[in-house]
Image (cartoon, rainbow, N blue to C red):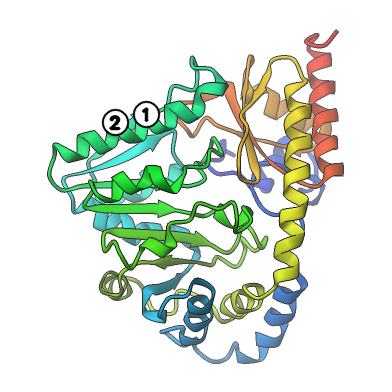
Amino acid sequence: MAQPTHGGNITWAAELAGCSPSSILDFSASINPLGPPQSAIAAIQASLSTLRDYPDPDYRQLRSRLSQVHNLAPEWILPGNGSAELLTWASRELAELSSVYLMTPAFSDYLRALKAFHARIVPCPLDLMTRSIAGLEDDVQQALQAMVVAAQTHASCGLLINNPHNPTGHLLKRAVLLSALQSFDLVVVDEAFMDFLPHEQDQSVIDWVQKYANLVVLRSLTKFYSLPGLRLGYAIAHPDRLRRWQQWRDPWSVNTPAAAAAEAVLGDYEFQQQTWNWLAEARSHLFQGLSALPGLHPYPGAANYLLVRCDRSAVKLQHQLLKQHQILIRDCVSFPELGDRFFRVAVRTQAENQRLLDGLTNVLRTNNLLE
């Protein structure tokens, strides 16, 4: 079986480790380890009796619930089959422009979706191999500013960017995105991991959508609420744009149990607070543990994952962890700018994080990298 492009492929991992998929401890997919919340499970069970009926193609009930959360009229919101589906339609619009600027390394699905519509992609790379970890914020701001300057001198340009940035976990301040909105014809901000920041810390630009018709915000409900198997996300953008997307896509893209679960979890404030309370401490503990291991250099991040630069082959380290400890980390080979000297790990529970640190310690000691 070929090396997977995305994280979360536990079937591949189990085959390599020689164990059952249920034995794999998965750090490769950045999913909340506290979920799925009971509110989602109860809503899914209650929706089973409606499986014989088609979903409402306009998803009026779900859009109404999302409109309450974001204080927007429902027509400004479009649910989708995961944010990946909505990324496809955003990329179709971006591809109509003369060029699309992309800060790299970038989530691999961006390239997939843009190339599907033959977009002209202009990469703006971060130099993560040679620059210090402490200088990441300056590098990100310089890269964004360089794209803004380029857009001002070229007609019909688009920008696709995520916040927090994947894979570095760096959180862009709202202020640095403002110049992009004033320079690009279309700006798509992927906020798939923004929910992991408490409201007083997040840097969402959703409240700018009504002011800037060239802004699209993508959101995921599967990572924070640990529901990747349901495939549910939504886009926030001008109603005219969302109506075009609705005409392009297949009908009933969101199934009834997914819509029911979404409506339930959006009001699960206890689970939201529990997640915020868990993440800050668990991420700090994991960061410190990784920093203490020789040859590993983690980047501080704002989301529920950490990017780690290593002084050895990350793929070899990944395979050794799987075979010896049934632990799966995300190699970064699918990010061409990173290659085989980086890996990414999700933040999980304290006990699971410690199991990862113990496994890494054992592998490094086996390779005589620990005294």
Residue picked out by circle 2: 146
Query: Decide: marks 2, 1 in contact (CB < 8 A)?
Result: yes
Within-10-Å neighbours for mark 2: few <14, some 14–19, many 20+: few
CA separation, marks 2 and 1?
6 Å
Say which amino acid is labelled 2. Answer: Ala
Q: Secondary structure at mark 2?
A: helix
Image-based side of 340 in relation to 33, left or right? left
Question: In x, y percent, where is residue 267?
Answer: 65, 76
Task: Identify the image quadrant of the N terminus.
Answer: top right
Q: Residue 45: horizontal and vertical position, in percent?
A: 72, 82
Quadrant hosting residue 7 = top right
Q: Mark 1: which amino acid?
A: Gln
**Residue 121: % across, % down:** 27, 39
The percent position of residue 46, horizontal first and vertical second, equals 70, 87
Please state, as top left, top right, bottom left or bottom right, where the C terminus lies in the image. Answer: top right
Examine the rendering and report whether any part of residue 269 can be seen.
yes
41 on left or right of 300: right
For the point 79% across and 36% down, the residue is 285
Write down the residue under mark 1. 142
- Which label was assigned to residue 177? none
Relative to 342, say whether 19 is above or below: below
Q: Residues within 10 Å of mark 1 (few under 14, many from 20)?
A: some
Residue at x 25% of width, y 49% of height? 182
What's the residue at 69%, 47% (across, down)?
A: 10
90 left or right, relative to 98: right
- Residue situated in front as seen by the camera: 280 or 112: 280
Number of callouts: 2
Q: Nearer the viewer, residue 299 or 229?
A: 299
Frontmost residue, 357 versus 217: 217
Secondary structure of residue under mark 1: helix
